[in-house]
Image (spheres, grey):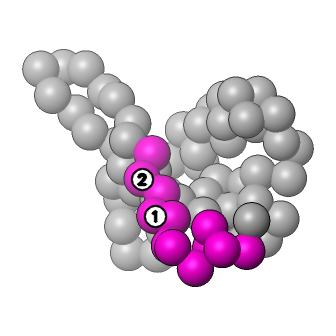
């Protein structure tokens, strides 16, 4: 993803989740996705999908059962 696209996604996600500590970073060697961090901790991958001339983004976050026990 391009830096401008990453900045737009970061701004959108910060507003949506109400967190100024959320950061979207480019993935090394990957052009179709970026990583999402909160307080420096990796939480998700954002995938860009293009179909029929339209672009959409998939937010993929795994939640482990051990994470639920700590909540």
* Residue 58 image-quadrant placement: top left
Disc number lying in front (1 or 2): 1
Q: Residue lying at the far right in this picture: please name it.
A: 20
Query: Does residue 15 appear left or right of residue 12 in this picture?
Result: right
Q: Nearer the viewer, residue 57 or 29?
A: 57
Query: Does residue 58 appear left or right of residue 41 in this picture?
Result: left
Q: Residue at x 18, y 20 (%)?
A: 53
Q: Residue at x 34, y 29 (%)?
A: 56
Start-end of magenta stretch: 59-70
Is residue 33 positioned above or below 13 on the image? below
Rendering coords of residue 13 (x, y %): 66, 36
Is residue 43 positioned above or below 3 on the image? below
Proximity of marks 1 and 2: CB atoms separated by less than 8 Å: yes
Location of the C terminus by quadrant is bottom right
Q: Would you name the residue on which mark 1 appears?
A: 62
Q: Is residue 33 magenta?
A: no
* Residue 25 image-quadrant placement: bottom right
Question: Which mark is on residue 49?
Answer: none
Q: Would you name the residue on which mark 2 appears?
A: 60
Q: Nearer the viewer, residue 11 or 29?
A: 11
Disc 1 is placed on an element classified as loop
Rendering coords of residue 42 (x, y %): 63, 70
Give neighbour class at mark 2: few <14, some 14-19, many 20+ (Cα, 10 Å).
Answer: few
Q: Nearer the viewer, residue 62 or 48?
A: 62
Rendering coords of residue 22 (x, y %): 76, 51
Is residue 6 positioned above or below 32 on the image? above
Query: Does residue 6 appear left or right of residue 47 in this picture?
Result: right
Query: Does residue 54 appear left or right of residue 17 in this picture?
Result: left
Can residue 25 be seen at all in this image of the molecule? no
Q: Is residue 66 magenta?
A: yes
């Amino acid at each position: 993803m391009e830096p401008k696209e990453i900045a737009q996604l970061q701004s959108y996600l910060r507003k949506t989740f109400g967190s100024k500590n959320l950061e979207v970073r480019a993935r090394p060697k990957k052009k179709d996705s970026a990583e999402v961090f909160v307080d420096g901790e990796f939480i998700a991958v954002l995938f860009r999908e293009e179909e029929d001339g339209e672009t959409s983004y998939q937010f993929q976050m795994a939640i482990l059962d051990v994470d639920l026990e700590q909540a």
